[in-house]
């Protein structure tokens, strides 16, 4: 089948210009994120909720932590082991303090934190900015200072703050109280807002939390994953160091996701500069799943201190797009490109103009190298005297390709290869 040629309409171009102007306006008026020195790149780690829900206990956390290390996750940047809801007892102590569920965690939270810290990792816990957590355990509304102090004493490094049982108090009034309480402890604690993207939180959350949820809870299916991704792209321009947009935790390895869906899911979160929090059972991961979540090229896009959250350049109407192109510029000037196939069938061969994503080589003097981020192989070198488009091979249903586009002068490797061939011929 012949490649589908894509043209850039003037209306699309003007829409892009308007978006960039909005970025400039907001960058002048908005803060640069929560100023606590944390979250300069998106956090990476594990959270219990997606797989275990309330079925957590001390031995499980010990086993997950050990498997975390065994899989080599710290070597590629994963750091946090986070407990979600249900770690706490059903009631507070007589003096109003949090205590661990005595049946699940008989030795308390500090023992959990010490175990995690002893393995070179960081420790996270959860509560809700309401009278109860989402599972009806005691919430932190009205107990912010005391709870923050308990977290600091236990050695907590990451705190996820949910939005259940809010007593109809606006989030903009509830969440900053906990921000100040955490800061007052003197302990660096990454503050993760889980306010579901409601109440126009994109306007105020970046100055309150180190990350902020843009969506409801993610499900273990492609529809939920793709929906959360698109929702989180609405305000991509608000993403910045210390204030990352959070489309919820990863579902790689969960449900009945195909291999290609797992790959696309992870790639989308990397390009969205989202927190990379594994939500599967680490103890039963396949090697294919481990290879996906430890892909250092994609992780490098996510953790690049210069790169912004990737924005959409083609196929940007979520209601009609069959495939989309997202891109962001990396440290050093290369451009990372993600193409996602939203269709329930294999995509045709596609092309997209390189200049659309900001890759404009000088004719006759430069070439564009295309590196496949999944395989780390240079798959093409283009002389733009003859071609100004980047071809995309057919993608599986809900699959993706991820490229790094580099403008190269003089092509030293190609010259070396030609020299080697001449020497062999002689």
Image: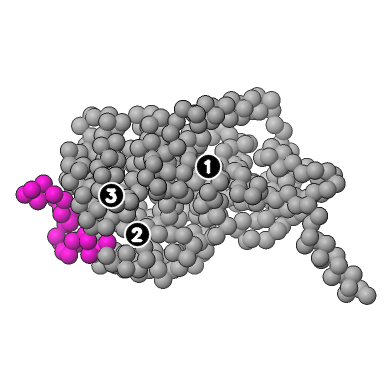
Q: Kindly indicate the quadrant of the structure image that contains residue 44.
A: bottom left
Residue for badge 3: 186
Q: Earlier in the sequence, mark 2 or mark 3?
A: 2
User: Distance between the Cα atoms at labels 1 and 2?
Assistant: 25 Å
How crowded is the residue under tag 3: few (<14 C-alpha within 10 Å), some, or many (20+)? Answer: few
Task: Tell me the residue at 25%/42% (across/down).
Answer: 181
Q: Is residue 132 visible?
A: no
**Residue 105 percent coordinates (x, y):** 19, 62
- Magenta segment: does it hold 91? yes
Residue for badge 2: 122
Task: Tell me the residue at 27%/61% (across/down).
Answer: 113
User: Distance between the Cα atoms at labels 1 and 3?
Assistant: 30 Å
User: Distance between the Cα atoms at labels 2 and 3?
Assistant: 17 Å
Closest to the camera, between mark 1 and mark 3, is 3
Q: Which mark is residue 243?
A: none
How crowded is the residue under tag 2: few (<14 C-alpha within 10 Å), some, or many (20+)? Answer: many
The quadrant in which the C terminus is found is: bottom right
Task: Tell me the residue at 37%/45% (across/down).
Answer: 36
**Residue 91 percent coordinates (x, y):** 11, 49
**Residue 360 percent coordinates (x, y):** 74, 41
What secondary structure predominates along the stretch shown in magenta? loop
């Amino acid at each position: 089948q012949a490649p589908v040629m894509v043209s850039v309409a003037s209306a699309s171009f003007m829409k892009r210009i308007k978006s960039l102007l909005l970025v400039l306006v907001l960058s002048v008026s908005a803060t640069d994120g929560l100023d606590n020195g944390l979250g300069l790149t998106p956090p990476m780690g594990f959270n219990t909720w997606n797989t275990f829900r309330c079925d957590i206990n001390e031995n499980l956390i010990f086993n997950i932590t050990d498997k975390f290390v065994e899989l080599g996750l710290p070597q590629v940047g994963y750091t946090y082991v986070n407990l979600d809801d249900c770690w706490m007892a059903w009631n507070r102590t007589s003096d109003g303090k949090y205590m661990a569920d005595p049946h699940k965690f008989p030795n308390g939270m500090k023992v959990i934190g010490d175990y995690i810290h002893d393995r070179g990792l960081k420790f996270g816990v959860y509560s809700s900015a309401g009278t109860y957590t989402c599972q009806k355990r005691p919430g932190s509304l009205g107990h912010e200072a005391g709870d923050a102090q308990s977290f600091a004493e236990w050695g907590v490094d990451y705190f996820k703050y949910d939005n259940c049982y809010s007593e109809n108090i606006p989030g903009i009034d509830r969440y900053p109280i906990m921000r100040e309480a955490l800061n007052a402890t003197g302990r660096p604690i990454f503050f993760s807002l889980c306010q579901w993207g409601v109440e126009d939180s994109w306007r105020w959350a970046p100055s309150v939390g180190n990350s902020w949820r843009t969506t409801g809870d993610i499900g273990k299916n492609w529809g939920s994953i793709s929906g959360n991704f698109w929702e989180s792209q609405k305000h991509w321009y608000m993403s910045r160091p210390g204030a990352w947009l959070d489309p919820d935790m990863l579902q790689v390895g969960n449900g009945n996701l195909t291999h290609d869906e797992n790959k696309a899911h992870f790639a989308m979160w990397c390009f969205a500069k989202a927190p990379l929090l594994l939500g599967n059972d680490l103890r039963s991961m396949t090697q294919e799943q481990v290879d996906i979540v430890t892909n250092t090229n994609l992780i490098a896009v996510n953790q690049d201190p210069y790169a912004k959250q990737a924005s959409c350049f083609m196929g940007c109407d979520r209601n009609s797009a069959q495939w989309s192109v997202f891109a962001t510029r990396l440290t050093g000037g290369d451009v990372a490109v993600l193409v996602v196939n939203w269709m329930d069938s294999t995509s045709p061969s596609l092309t997209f103009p390189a200049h659309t994503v900001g890759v404009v080589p000088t004719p006759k003097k430069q070439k564009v190298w295309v590196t496949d981020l999944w395989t780390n192989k240079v798959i093409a070198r283009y002389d733009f005297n003859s071609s100004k488009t980047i071809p995309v091979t057919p993608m599986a249903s809900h699959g993706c390709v991820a490229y790094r586009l580099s403008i190269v002068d003089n092509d030293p490797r190609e010259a070396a290869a030609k020299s080697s061939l001449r020497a062999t011929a002689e």
